[in-house]
Image (cartoon, grey):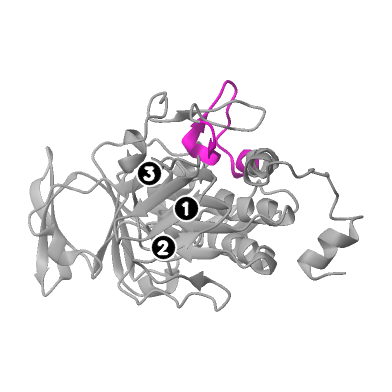
Amino acid sequence: MDDGAAPPALPERVATAPAGQDYTTDVIILGAGPVGLFAVFELGLLDLKAHVVDVLDRPGGQCAELYPEKPIYDIPGLPIVTGQELTDRLMEQIKPFHPTFHFTQMAEALERLPDGKFKLTTELGTTITAPVLVIAAGGGSFVPRKPKLDNLESYEAKSVFYAVRKMEHFRDQRIVIAGGGDSALDWTLALAPLAKSLTLVHRRDDFRAAPHSVAQMRKLVAEGRVTLEIADIKELHGADGRLASLTLENKERGRYDIGADRLLAFYGLTMKLGPIADWGLNLEKNLIPVDTEKFETSEPGIFAIGDINWYPGKLKLILSGFHEAALMSQAAFKIARPGERLVFLYTTSSSDLQKKLGVA
């Protein structure tokens, strides 16, 4: 879901392949999030070409889709960077390797061919054949948990949203934010200065967000800059997909209405592995166990990196996924280039790598 505005055009450097055709490459990557994009870089250093498949219509994965303007503080060398900025930097970094992207397509079927390679088929009939498959699909396919309200669909993408892509699109609006977790509190704090009015609605006066964020929110409430309603949302009112008001309900007041132009519902996400769950991989609570030498799954030639994988001591950090991508690429080379010698080189000292990157 977006906030009603047309999505930005993809950068010119993104090669989007026509759907319904047959392709051959060295490595198939499922997922165009930060970890999948960095895998393109690490593979490219080894002269391995990658095709990237993602159900979204642009690179960045959940990082750019759900938190494009939310700051990230734990990327090495970048004291502060937003999800979209990180995506843009990664896209610039992999530009020399000319990856091919297959956006708005879900991987539907996977078969191992007699020669040992994998043939991936998407829901749009695209087939990609490669000796290596890398699953970098975050935690799978995430979909927002939606409030159970009549006629909800008629308001979605017009005045009901599950993510913020551009804060400016909410300026001078009567905003209602529903939820009690980090996303709800973070966007309450971020949007309050822009909004005509902002109301936070949660079913109880207890929040699952960071204590500092909760304290900041309560300060804004005390100052009259944010209204806090301890209630449930019961009805949406408006016309042609445009909200005019919401009906709330609690024990003290019963049912009552508040004005609203925009509703942001942050009730969390539901994970769906989709077809990955049917590929014969060992699973551990909807995650894919891997070894910690090369991050290979129970199926030789299939690797899993980023939040989708599991191993003892796993940390769900972008940083961890970058490390996993580097080690995976070394193992992928041995499969994609059997018989060739793998020489480990540093980008700081190798003129060959610097030529590949266009910086020599």
Q: Is residue 161 above or below residue 229?
A: below
| Res. 251 image quadrant | top left
- Compare residues 290 and 156 and report the one nearer the observer: 290
Categorize mark 3 by other alpha carbons within 10 Å: few (<14), some (14-19), many (20+). some
Disc with the residue nearer the chain's start (2 vs 3) = 2
Badge 3 amino acid: Leu
Q: Mark 3 touching mark 1, by CB under 8 A?
A: no
- 300 vs 175, left or right, is right
Dot label at residue 22: 2
Q: Mark 2 touching mark 1, by CB under 8 A?
A: yes
Dot label at residue 129: 1
Residue bearing mark 3 = 110
Categorize mark 2 by other alpha carbons within 10 Å: few (<14), some (14-19), many (20+). some
> Can residue 206 be spotted in the picture?
no
Q: Which residues are magenta?
A: 300-321
Disc with the residue nearer the chain's start (3 vs 1) = 3
Q: Mark 2 and mark 1: span between their CA atoms?
A: 8 Å
State the SS at label 1: strand
Q: Mark 3 and mark 1: span between their CA atoms?
A: 10 Å
State the SS at label 3: strand
Q: Residue at x 69, y 68 (%)?
A: 96
Toward the top, the furthest residue is 312
Q: Looking at the picture, how far across and down is residue 109, in whole percent? A: 33, 46
Q: Is residue 232 above or below residue 25?
A: above
Q: Looking at the picture, how far across and down is residue 90, in whole percent? A: 63, 61
Disc with the residue nearer the chain's start (2 vs 1) = 2
Badge 2 amino acid: Asp
